[in-house]
Amino acid sequence: MLQFIKDKIRTVPNWPKPGIMFRDITTLLNDAESFKQTIDLLVERYKNMAIDKVAGIESRGFIIGSVLAYKLGVGFVPIRKKGKLPADVISQEYALEYGTDKIEIHADAFLPGAKILLVDDLIATGGTATAAGNLIKKLHGDVVESCFIVDLPDLGGTKKLETAGYKTFSLVEFSGE
């Protein structure tokens, strides 16, 4: 485990609602050396993989994903909440605890057959990440891997992604905490 990363992630109890232990990566991002080391670790993992684009899930996935895309010398694709992208989009609905939500990607984000690295800050229940992977598939892209800084394994998101056929990777996990 990469304790230096875990130590820089702030836990905010009872946010956004009672009983939730929110894992806040803004404190990791705010520490220049830890942020650099985090990105360097991810670059080392992905530098020799055939990746055409990095797709980041709104909004913290934009921060990690765009820097990683830059360092890998590839383009960045934003996956956003409904109604936030200006050109033609395709959408994917997914289940929330109460109801549904929708994310979107530009219809021309990449060419069919593109190798895509999917990035977000954290994997919890896996609903958004699975929906993002499905969007990439709708555009005939290939998700090389789904990458996260933090995994919350107790919530089952990694298992959900892997069951859906998506390979996953996380730097640290908060299990039973």
Image (cartoon, rainbow, N blue to C red):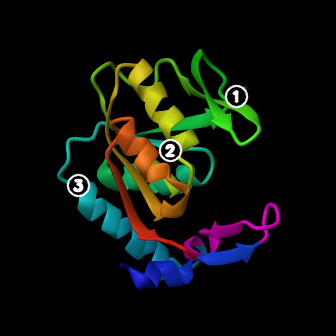
Range of residues picked out in magenta: 14-29
Mark 3: which amino acid?
Lys
The extreme top residue here reads: 88
At mark 3, the secondary structure is loop
Cα separation, mark 1 vs mark 2, equals: 15 Å
The residue depicted at 40 percent of the width and 55 percent of the height is 68
Crowd band around label 2 with a 10 angstrom C-alpha radius: few (<14), some (14–19), many (20+): many
At mark 1, the secondary structure is loop
Mark 2: which amino acid?
Gly
Cα separation, mark 3 vs mark 2, equals: 17 Å
Query: Which image quadrant is residue 81 in?
Result: top right
* Dot 1 or dot 2, earlier in sequence: 2
Question: Between 127 and 75, which is closer to the camera in this rendering?
Answer: 127
Please determine whether, in this image, residue 94 is positioned above or below residue 155.
above
The residue depicted at 48 percent of the width and 26 percent of the height is 135
Q: Is residue 23 magenta?
A: yes
Q: Position of residue 28 (x, y in %)?
A: 56, 75
Labelled disc at residue 82: 1
Q: Which residue is mark 2?
A: 56
Q: Position of residue 71 (x, y in %)?
A: 35, 56
* Dot 3 or dot 2, earlier in sequence: 3
Q: Which residue is mark 3?
A: 47
At mark 2, the secondary structure is strand
Mark 1: which amino acid?
Lys
